[in-house]
Image (cartoon, helix red, strand yellow):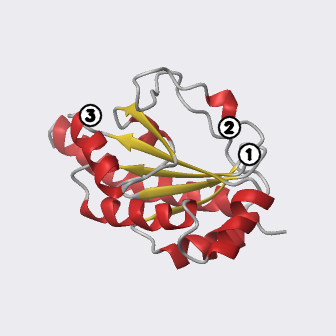
Amino acid sequence: MSKGKRFIISALLTIPALLLALTSCSESDSNPILSLPAELTDSDGQIFDSKSLKGKPLVINFFASWCDPCKREISEIEKIHNRSYKPELSSQYLDDLNVTFVGINSGETDINRAKDLINQTGASYIILYGDDGTLLQDVGAVGLPFTMFVNSNGEIVGTHLTAMSSDDVYARLDKYFKS
């Protein structure tokens, strides 16, 4: 068997193991700690200071402009962030629990297309650029959209692969952040 075929088979066997490990970590007492790379930038091209997120519960959504389900999910998250869908519930999470939404553009070859997507969707929460796919891979994701729920201690307490509706996001906010 050639090296290439062995690599592909090895990779295919490793992916389910990584998913199982990440899922197991998400539900156990020992959750992985999130560490954002220093090279992420904001919409103005400035290096983002991840220390500003310290101590806050986070919903981190990975997206790309070429991902149609990502577009829908960004709009669903924005409805919560701008309090236009179930405003009392969104205020409970955003104001009382200080949940912060963060979008991370991942694996994008044209940052202007990503910025156009953000303009089209009207996303007003924190949007970061500069992940070449490494961070997405490091957290065990195998596709987009991918969302992580991070508690105020920086622990990844939950993940979700595939697009969510606003109600899906609320259900996970209940699960991971409500006491």
Residue 19 picture location, percent across and down:
49, 58
The residues tagged by marks 1 and 3 sit, at their Cα atoms, a distance apart of 27 Å
The residues tagged by marks 1 and 2 sit, at their Cα atoms, a distance apart of 6 Å
Q: Quadrant of the C terminus?
A: bottom right
In the picture, measured across the screen, residue 153 lies left or right of residue 89, that is: right
- Give the residue furthest to the left: 2
Give amino acid for label 1: Lys
14 versus 90 height, above or below: above
Residue 67 picture location, percent across and down:
25, 57
Which is nearer the N-term, disc 1 or disc 3? 1
In the picture, measured across the screen, residue 121 lies left or right of residue 101, that is: left
Residue 135 picture location, percent across and down:
46, 37
Q: Quadrant of the N terminus?
A: top left
Q: Residues within 10 Å of mark 3 (few under 14, many from 20)?
A: some
Quick one: SS at disc 1? loop
80 versus 56 height, above or below: below
Quick one: SS at disc 2? helix
User: Which residue is rendered at x = 58% and y = 66% of the image?
Assistant: 83
Give amino acid for label 3: Ile
Which is nearer the N-term, disc 3 or disc 2? 2
From this viewpoint, is residue 144 visible? no
Quarter location, residue 54: top right
Give amino acid for label 2: Leu
Q: Residues within 10 Å of mark 1 (few under 14, many from 20)?
A: some
Query: Would you say the residues marked 3 and 2 are in contact, meaning their CB atoms lie under 8 Å apart?
Result: no
> Circle 1 is placed at which residue position?
56
Quarter location, residue 52: top right
> Circle 3 is placed at which residue position?
111
Q: Nearer the viewer, residue 83 or 38?
A: 83
> Circle 2 is placed at which residue position?
53
Quick one: SS at disc 3? helix
